[in-house]
Image (tube, rainbow, N blue to C red):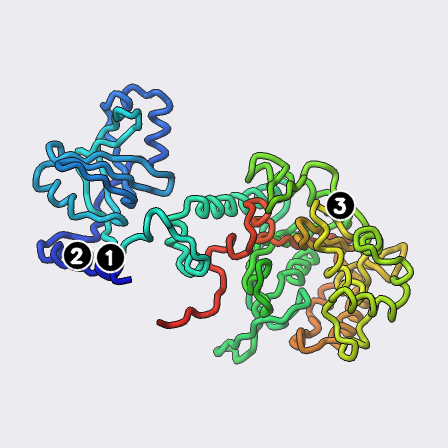
């Protein structure tokens, strides 16, 4: 600890000395003409003007390492595209300039201009004819060899994490590529990208506890959106037959390796389509995204190989409970027996508190606990009960279940879709029942009268789906925690020292 303080003290003293000498520590007058990648591409292309040392390159970046040899030094500098070596010699830049160069530190930003040459070891290096300090770092970077490993510090100081851990930077490059490719996939299929309100007068669109705020000028309470669903379907009513939004949503609930209070979803809606159409589209979209991000359709994730290419398994909720969960079929018609089974398997239930839980909710709780962790390869589960699917169309074959699917990969839910309920009378009745049965977990739940009004004007047969972008990013980057794919995840306040 004392050694670190001494390093900081010496650096601060050096900064004060530079200021006293009139050195500009944060200039903004250096022109960059090439990135590291540009220089490497020019060398690899065999451009003789470049490899022969006849072309001046102007590049800039953060100093990551310095090796001094008396009147010369090799440095490594890094920009957004990569890292390369530069060589600074006193007889080339001048005695005074080299004396100033020796005062620079690892972490400082530097501009360099000169040709490139190959060292005796064959490494292409930028030979500095001139250099310029562009930004002085007041603090030293984390120790080189041990790097930045503490997860808590990595998440709180993501800038250091990105700076010191190239594999972390690559995760977020892939995440950005994933979102871009999903957007392109839908745009190519005539979907319209839209934006809907993030602050809403009613907490709706999904069953979750919202964040609540107050608008002073309007003197009204507002909720950060749980999901954009009801607004997107209003747009379908209005004539936008294919819409999507890559959105930020918020749920005031637990934090875990799979949950963050603020998260990113894709929601999309297609008129004249069914939930079965969306299952086909989802398979196609995930293969497209996997290929774009990883270059293949088999993905390594936490020791498993996920196969996105083969036809994805599809089974009903009841089939999965029996064949995957090993639950005797007769229990699925015996409420008391299923309750006993659930408690024996550690499902989070209280016999007294949950005595009136609907059979549909009981079944899905058992599924979540017993079956979901076993669904490693991509699997669509269909046939969800009406009472847990308030926005889904009833099945024509069985009015007790809905035309809904959930997609599970690597033991977790990745997507949820259904044929939309477009009967305003049925929808209003379900909303009323949902409000009547609300509990402390969703006490803010209200019925959206305007959405019912929109349905009364008529919504075409429509299918819609939500996809967890963060969880999909986890799969495609082999990240164990959702915090590893969110640049600034929510954390408890750090303890003050």
Name the residue: 23% across, 28% down.
Answer: 115
Report the Cα–Cα distance between label 3 and label 2.
Answer: 64 Å
Viewer-side label of 3, 2: 2
* Foreground residue among 91 and 461: 91
Return the mark for residue 351.
none
- Badge 2: residue crowd in 10 Å (few <14, some 14–19, many ≥20): some
| Quadrant where the image shows the C terminus | bottom left
Count of marks placed on residues:
3
The picture places residue 6, in percent across and down from the top left corner, at 21, 60
Residue that mark 1 sits on = 138
Q: Is residue 181 left or right of residue 53?
A: right
- Badge 3: residue crowd in 10 Å (few <14, some 14–19, many ≥20): some
The picture places residue 474, in percent across and down from the top left corner, at 57, 50
Name the residue: 16% across, 43% down.
Answer: 101
Query: Decide: marks 1, 3 in contact (CB < 8 A)?
Result: no
Viewer-side label of 1, 3: 1
Q: Is residue 145 above or below residue 57?
A: below
Residue that mark 2 sits on = 15
* Foreground residue among 20 and 391: 20
Residue that mark 3 sits on = 277
Q: Is residue 442 left or right of residue 491?
A: right
């Amino acid at each position: 600890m004392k050694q670190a303080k001494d390093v900081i003290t010496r650096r601060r003293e050096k900064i004060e000395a530079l200021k006293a000498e009139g050195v500009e520590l944060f200039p903004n007058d250096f022109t960059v003409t090439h990135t590291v990648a540009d220089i490497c591409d020019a060398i690899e292309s065999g451009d003789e003007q470049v490899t022969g040392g006849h072309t001046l390159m102007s590049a800039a970046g953060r100093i990551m390492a310095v090796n001094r040899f008396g009147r010369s030094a090799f440095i490594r500098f890094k920009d957004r595209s990569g890292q390369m070596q530069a060589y600074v010699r006193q007889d080339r830049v001048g005695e005074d300039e080299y004396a100033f160069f020796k005062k620079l530190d690892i972490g400082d930003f530097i501009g360099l201009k000169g040709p490139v040459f190959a060292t005796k070891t064959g490494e292409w290096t930028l030979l500095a004819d001139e250099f310029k300090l562009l930004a002085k770092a007041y603090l030293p970077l984390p120790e080189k060899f041990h790097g930045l490993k503490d997860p808590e510090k990595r998440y709180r100081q993501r800038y250091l994490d990105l700076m010191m851990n190239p594999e972390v930077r690559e995760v977020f490059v892939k995440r950005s590529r994933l979102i871009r490719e999903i957007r392109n996939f839908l745009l190519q299929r005539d979907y319209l990208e839209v934006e809907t309100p993030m602050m809403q007068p009613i907490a709706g669109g999904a069953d979750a506890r919202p964040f609540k705020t107050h608008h002073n000028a309007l003197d009204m309470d507002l909720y950060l959106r749980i999901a954009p669903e009801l607004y997107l379907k209003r747009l379908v009513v209005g004539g936008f037959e294919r819409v999507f939004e890559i959105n930020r949503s918020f749920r005031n609930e637990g934090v875990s390796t799979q949950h963050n209070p603020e998260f990113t979803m894709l929601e999309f809606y297609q008129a004249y389509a069914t939930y079965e159409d969306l299952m086909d589209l989802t398979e196609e979209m995930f293969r497209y995204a996997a290929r774009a991000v990883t270059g293949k359709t088999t993905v390594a994730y936490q020791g498993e190989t996920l196969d996105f290419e083969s036809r994805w398994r599809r089974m009903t909720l009841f089939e999965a409970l029996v064949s995957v969960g090993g639950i005797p079929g007769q229990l699925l018609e015996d409420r008391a027996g299923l309750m006993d089974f659930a408690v024996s398997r550690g499902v989070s239930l209280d016999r007294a508190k949950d005595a009136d839980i609907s059979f549909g909710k009981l079944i899905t709780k058992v599924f979540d606990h017993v079956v979901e962790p076993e669904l490693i390869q991509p699997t669509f589960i269909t046939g969800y009960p009406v009472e847990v699917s308030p926005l889904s169309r009833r099945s024509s074959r069985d009015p007790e279940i809905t035309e809904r699917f959930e997609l599970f990969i690597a033991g977790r839910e990745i997507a949820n879709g259904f044929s939309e309920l477009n009967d305003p009378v049925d929808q209003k009745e379900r909303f009323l029942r949902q409000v009547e049965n609300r509990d402390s977990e969703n006490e803010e739940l209200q019925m959206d009268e305007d959405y019912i009004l929109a349905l009364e004007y008529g919504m075409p047969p429509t299918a819609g789906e939500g996809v967890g972008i963060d969880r999909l990013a986890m799969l495609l980057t082999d990240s164990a925690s959702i915090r590893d794919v969110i640049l600034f995840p929510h954390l408890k306040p750090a303890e003050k020292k």
